[in-house]
Structure formats: C-alpha cells, structure tokens
Amino acid sequence: MPPAQPPPGKPQKFYFFYGHRKPSQNRPTVRGGLFSNRLTLTPPKSQPKIKPQTQPSDLSKWDPHLHPSSPSKPTTTPTLSFLSPIARFILDAFRKNQSQWGPPVVSELRKLRRVTPDLVAEVLKVQTEPALASKFFHWAGKQKGYKHNYASYNAFAYCLNRTNRYRSADQVPELMESQGRPPSEKQFEILIRMHSDANRGLRVYYVYEKMKKFGVKPRVFLYNRIMDALVKTGYLDLALSVYEDFKDDGLVEESVTFMILMKGLCKSDRIEEMLEILEKMRANLCKPDVFAYTAMIRVMVSEGNLDGSLRVWKEMRRDKVEPDVIAYTTLIIGLCKGGGVEKGHELFKEMKEKGILIDRDIYGALVQAFVGDGKVGLACDLLKDLMESGYRADLGIYNSLIQGLCNVNRVDKAYKLFRVTVQEGLGPNFVTICPILVSYAETRKMDDFCELLVQMQKLGVSVMDDLSKFFSFMVGKEDRVKMALEVFDDLKVRGYYSVAIYNILMEALHRIGMATKAVSLLNEMKDMNVQPDSSTYSVAIECFVDDENAKEACVCYNKIIETSCIPSVSAYCSLARGLCKIGEIDAAMMLVRDCLASVRSGPMEFKYALNVLHACKSGDAAEVLAVLSEMMQEGCPPDDVVYSAVVSGMCKHGTIEEARKIFSNLRERKLLSEARTIQYDEILVDHMKKKTADLVVSGLKFFGLESKLKAKGSTLLSN
C-alpha cells in the first residue's frame, strides 16, 4: 500500500536520510545517499542543502608522489594512477634514488613482506629504465619462495623491447629455461610481434630459428605472421624457406597464407612462381576473391609492373571473378601512370557498358594521361562525359586540360577553362595559369599577360610570388633565358619587379656563361632603388670572379657580412679560388675558416685545406702528401685552394724545399701540369718573400727601429 499523501501546505518529510557510514574494524565503508518519499524524487526548494561529509582516507587511492599538505590535485602522471599501492611504493623507491639500483633501493624493498610475480609484472609494465628493470627482476627472483611466472617474464621482455633492448629481450627464452620454466609458443609470439611491428625482419627469422631449437612448433597463425614480416621487409627467400617448414610440419594453408606468398612474389616480379601458388590455392582451398586479386594488382601497380598486373587481371577473368569498382580503379590509374592509357581507356569503356559507377579519380587519371600523349581531343571528350555523368570536375582535371590546350596552341580555349575555374570557385593557382602565361610570353601578348595577373590579384593571389615561380620555370631551359629577359623588360615598365626575380635571372645568366649581363642587372637594381639581398650579392661574387674582378667580389662579400648574413657555399668557393689565383693566399685561408665556421656542411676542399695546414706544422712533405692521398681516395681531387694551403702552411712552418717536393710529386702523378707547377713555384717564392718582409718589419717595430728604416728610405729616394 502506498504511503499517504501529506496534507497540502506542509513541508515534505523524508522517511530516512543517512550519509557515509563511518568505517570501523568490523564494518566496512557504506556509501549511502538521499532517499525520499516514493512519490517525490527531488527535494523541495525550501529544503536546506546538506553539506557533504568528508570522505575517509582510502588505501587504494594512496599516492606516494602526492605531498600530504598539497591540494587535492595529484601530481602523478596518469599512467601510474591505475597501479596498486605496493607497486607505487616500489616505483617511489626507485624515484627517490634517482633510478639507480643500490643498497638504498634494496633496503626500501626489504620493507615489503613478500613480492609476487604479478607485482613484478605490474612494476615492469611501466618501467622505462632497462638497467633498473633487469636488477629488480633478478632481485625478485632471488627472494625466498619466489618463482617467476609467465606474466613476469612477458612483462620483462616487453620492458626490454620498449627501451630498445630487443636483443636482450630475445634472450628471455634462455633465461626461462635456465630457471626451470621452458618457454611456450606465447613467449616466442610476443617476440615475433615486437620485431614485426618494428619491421625487423631478420630478428623475426632469428626468433623463429630459436623456436625450432627449443622444439616449439608454431601454429598456422604464427607461421603467417612470420612469413608476412619477412615479406614486408624484403626477405622473400627466407619467407619461402619458412613456408617449406610449414609444409614439413603437416599444416594446412589458409587463404591468408597463400595471399602473403603471392603478394610477396608479385612485389619481386616472380610471376611464374606466383601463378604456381595460385594454382595450388585453387586446388587445395578455393579461388581467390575480388579483394585478393585487387591486392595483388595493387602490389604490381605500385612496383610499376603493368604486364604483371594485366596477367593477374586475366587470371581473375579466368576464375570468373567479377571485378568491382576498386579493382577497375586500381588497374586503370596504374595503366595511366605507366603509359598504358589505351588499355586503361578500354577498361573505362567496359565499366560504362556494365553500368559500374565510375570514380572521378579515373576521369582525372585518363585526362592527365591523354594530355601527356598529346591527345587533347580525347581528354576534352572525357571532360564532357564527366559533366554529363553528373560529376563536377576538380581543379586537377582543369589544370591538365589547360596545359594540353596550351601545348596545341589553343590558348583561347585554355583561357575559357580558366574562367570556368573562377566561376565555379575552384581557386585557380599558379599551376593553372602558368601554361597560359608561357603561351602569352611566347607570342608576346604582354597586355593579355598583365590582364591575367590582374585577375589573379583580384582572387587574392600573391602575383609577385607567382611571377617568381614563372621566371624560375622559364629559365629552367637554357633556350628560354633570353625570352625571360625580354618579358622582364616589359614587366619592369608596368611595375612588376622584385629582388627574387632579379636573383633568378642573375643565376640563370651566370649558369649559361653571361656573367657580364648578370652584373649589369645588379647595377640596374641599384638604379631602380631595389635593395639587393645576400642571395643577390652571392651570385654577384661568382660573376665578378668569372670576370677576373676579385676586388669587386670582395666588396660584395663585405656587404653581405655587414648585413649579418652568410654568403652561399658556391660564393665562398668561387671567391676563395679567385683570391688564390691573384696570390692573396692569406685572405683565401681566412675565407676558408670563415666558411667552415658559418655553414653547416662546408665543401670537402675547404676541410682538407685545413688538414693540409695542420700537416704543414710538422714541416715534413710526406705528411702533407699523405693528406692529399687521402683526399684523392675520397674522390675529391686537389684544387687551387688546397694548393694554396700547401703554400701558406709551408711558408709559415716549413721550407721552400719541402713545398717543392710536394709540387714535384703532384707533377709526377700528373695532377699538375708543368706550367701550373712553375706558376705555383713562383707563387711560393713570392709568398715566402712577403712573409719574410713581414717578419723583418715586425722585428723592427718590436725593437723601435721603424723610424730609422723610414729615414733611410727617404734618403734613398732623395738620392
């Protein structure tokens, strides 16, 4: 019988209320709550709120990392919150001793009454120090009445693998056997899975060989995993040897077994062997389904083996397996990328006859392939068919068609397609307009060229960035450099110029041997108040050195240093060689040191130049020749910088005779011509005279005789 309703106007009364019962020795904690009348589930608003009582401490929530006076927010990492209190106590002992095993850790662990294998496994699951984990594992094994179980062994193996000690993890089976617990298949499966996930195929085979030594026979599942790991890592022959063991064990293949082997054989282009496995699969198990055939075709296509993929396609037809849209898409796209667009188009027509839904990617691949073959008409027909099928062409398809139309000199139609991309909001980019810009440049339609730039600017595109890409594309071919200069001359008048464009043109001119023209562009930048950057001056350094104007090259180098920038490596090399040719040996060696100190990967010639300078400190020609021999063994023949290093080092630490021995040896080995040997001998004598004169002047300055030297010089001049 339901309880009687209270009279109206009286406050609601509850039958009983209790909170958390206070725990005692004989009575555990009871979690209570608020219970009211059955007819009223929520208390009235007039009822005062009852403050929740403080919960008693719970041992299961004990955390050694949380200070007692700290707020309720724990400071432990979330990965440790699920551990038992004793496991957290052990980890806290490790932490307090800075993860170093020693007497303090052992004394802390001895406070525990006993250690169980499950507790050891729990600690090892979160341990990240392999040395500490090994010490703890072996310490636990020495406790009285303790024996490791499979869980602790497995956790130990996982811990070693997690810390990249997988070779040590492979020795866990021997450890288990030595402690009287022979490993089962599960332990080897764990090791195989670890190596398989890390793509360590040879380690997988090593563990498999160890399984055979222990007399453990894998199941079909584990055999499949071993062969799959070997195939994925490129060890197909080892996988086939494992398959022979599979058959010797009397096991029956599954569909996965056959597929692993066939995919591996397809990837290695061993089609005949793959067909043998396929026949065996048909005879012993079943015919492959469409997914298996698609997987094999995908492997063939990824390796670029179109003939093999077509043979697999024929085998699929032989088994009367109906290909789905994914199989068609995989093969057609592969044929289009590999130059078999005609066969791909036939399969496309076959799909239309069967009424299979054709993916837009197929249209895109066919359009791109037809444009590449110069069959722009067929590509346009595909665009029409695409729209009639209810699809909307993407920007990639339009870009391919625009490129094709420009290739056949139909830039007017290409421009119409560009307008279509704008109307449909596809966001045309530089790839879209580049063919049109090139066509306008070739036909000298600069008004249309600039109009297209204005339209792109209205779309929010950075025109100057696109122009930089355009000129980079133009100067990619040597015969277009002159055309690029002419286009730039027209664009400068309209205000389209930048430092990046000047740099691109200067690099192109220097590359084709027109250094003087490149220097004229640098002067033009100064006239137009365009501030050159470090790249500009780096190219200018190379151009000035080619024009045998090392003085101006040094001026450009100083301007780069003044702006706290670093020249390019090619500029360093060019300037160093230029200084060596004019006899500025000391300046060249300073430049070598500056380059190696500034760039991350300096040229090999500069590194060996410093080695030569260091070898010259001995004053022995044999040590210098040893460095030069090592340099040539590394495939780096000596150049002017290295020869100048010999001159500099021998003039400073050795003698002229030892330096001449080096150059004579190089001449005998036909590394130096007779003319170059004579030239370097003159440079050697001049540099030695210069160094001697510098030493004399320094001595006079030291003894205060410089004034007498000046007076004697003036007397000689007066006479």
Image (cartoon, rainbow, N blue to C red):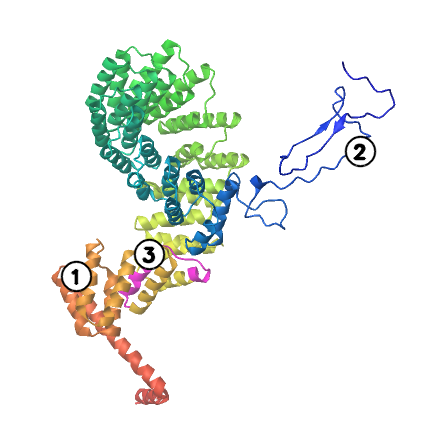
Which residue appears at 78% of the width and 17% of the height? 3
Q: Is residue 560 magenta?
A: yes
Mark toward the viewer: 1 or 3: 3
| Residue 625 point in image, percent of width and height | 18, 64
* In the foreground, 296 or 483: 296
Q: Amino acid at mark 3?
A: Gly
* Marks 1 and 3 in Cβ contact (< 8 Å): no
Residue situated furthest right in the rendering: 9
The residue lying furthest to the front in this view is 26
Q: Nearer the viewer, residue 223 or 684?
A: 223
- Residue, disc 1: 672
Image quadrant containing the N terminus: top right
Residue 499 is situated, as x and y percent measured from the top left of the image, at 45, 50
Q: CA distance from mark 1 to mark 3?
A: 25 Å
Q: Is residue 287 magenta?
A: no
Relative side of 17 to 404, left or right: right
**Any mark on residue 48, and which?**
2
In the picture provided, is 407 more to the left or to the right than 77? left
Examine the residues drawn in magenta and state their main secondary structure. helix
Residue marked by disc 3: 602
